[in-house]
Image: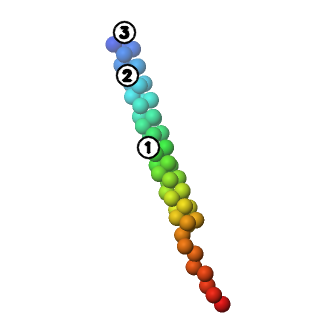
Amino acid sequence: MKSLNKKKISSKKKEVNIKTSDLQKLYSERIERFMALVELSYALKTAPRIIQKK
C-alpha cells in the first residue's frame, strides 16, 4: 500500500512540475515580449526627429 501511495504522490508531483514549467515558459515568453515593447517604446521616444521644412 505504501508503495502505491508513493507512486501516486510522485506522479502528482510530476504533473505539478510539468504544469509549473509550462507556466514558467509562458511567463518568461511574455516577459521577453513586454521588455521588447519597452525597449522599442524607449527607442522611439528618444530617437531624433526629422522635421520637414515647407
Q: Secondary structure at mark 1?
A: helix
Q: Residues within 10 Å of mark 2 (few under 14, many from 20)?
A: few
For label 1, the residue is: 25
| Above or below, comparing residue 23 to residue 45 in the picture | above
Label whose residue precedes the other's in the sequence (2 or 1): 2
Considering every residue shown, the one lying at the far right of the view is: 54
| Above or below, comparing residue 48 to residue 17 in the picture | below
For label 3, the residue is: 1
Q: What distance separates the C-alpha of mark 3 from that of mark 2?
A: 14 Å
Q: Secondary structure at mark 2?
A: helix
Residue 38 falls left or right of residue 8? right
**Could you say where residue 45 lies in the image, as x and y percent from the top left?**
58, 65
Q: Residues within 10 Å of mark 1 (few under 14, many from 20)?
A: few
| Residue at left offset 36%, top offset 19% | 7
Q: Nearer the viewer, mark 1 or mark 3?
A: 1
Q: What distance separates the C-alpha of mark 1 from that of mark 3?
A: 36 Å
**Could you say where residue 18 lies in the image, as x and y percent from the top left?**
41, 34
| Above or below, comparing residue 54 to residue 27 in the picture | below
Q: Residues at badges 3 and 2 in contact (C-beta under 8 Å)?
A: no
**Could you say where residue 27 lies in the image, as x and y percent from the top left?**
49, 43
Quarter of the image where the C terminus is located: bottom right
Q: Nearer the viewer, mark 3 or mark 2?
A: 2
Q: Residues at badges 1 and 3 in contact (C-beta under 8 Å)?
A: no
**Could you say where residue 30 lies in the image, as x and y percent from the top left?**
50, 49
Amino acid on which the number 3 mark rests in the picture: Met
Considering every residue shown, the one lying at the far bottom of the view is: 54
Label whose residue precedes the other's in the sequence (1 or 3): 3
For label 2, the residue is: 10
Q: What distance separates the C-alpha of mark 2 from that of mark 1?
A: 22 Å
Amino acid on which the number 1 mark rests in the picture: Lys
Quarter of the image where the N terminus is located: top left
